[in-house]
Amino acid sequence: MPTKNPRVNVVMEESLYVTLKELARRDDVSVSLKARDLLKEAVAEEEDAYWARMAAEREKTYSAGKALSHKKLWKRR
């Protein structure tokens, strides 16, 4: 049966595969679904780390004197 979702083949160490299988069994899901869920979590963590770095960089150049207040910003529109 064809699927709409793309597929990925992954090569991993035996110990990682055993752990993945155990986690899937524990959660009563397929190995494929467990791998997908773990990848989704990892991507979310990477995105969070990226935006935290971007915020830290922007914070270095923040100047309260140059910033617009909420009130001033919404009056200008």
Image (spheres, grey):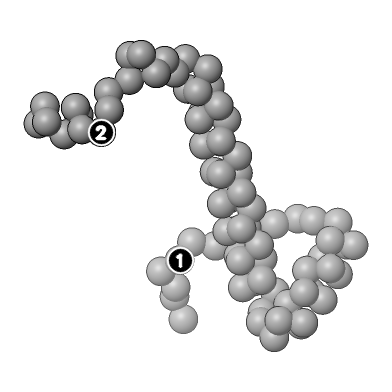
Question: Foreground: 6 or 72?
Answer: 72
Q: Secondary structure at mark 2?
A: helix
Q: Secondary structure at mark 1?
A: loop
Q: CA distance from mark 2 to mark 1?
A: 44 Å
* In this picture, residue 30 sits left or right of residue 6: right
Q: Splitting the image into 4 quarters, where does residue 56 fall?
A: top right
Q: Give coordinates of residue 55: x percent, y percent.
A: 50, 30
Q: Name the amino acid type tagged 2.
A: His
Q: Residue at 25%, 33% (x, y): give it.
A: 70
The image's mark for residue 29 is none
Give the mark toward the camera: 2 or 1: 2
**Residue bearing mark 2:** 70
Q: Give coordinates of residue 74: x percent, y percent.
A: 16, 34
**Residue bearing mark 1:** 5
Q: Earlier in the sequence, mark 2 or mark 1?
A: 1
- Callout 1 environment at 10 Å: few (<14), some (14 to 19), or many (20+)? few
Q: Residue at 78%, 69% (x, y): give it.
A: 20
Q: Residue at 60%, 39% (x, y): give it.
A: 49
Question: Foreground: 63 or 12?
Answer: 63
* In this picture, residue 72 sits left or right of residue 30: left
Q: Residue furthest right?
A: 15
Count of labels in the image: 2
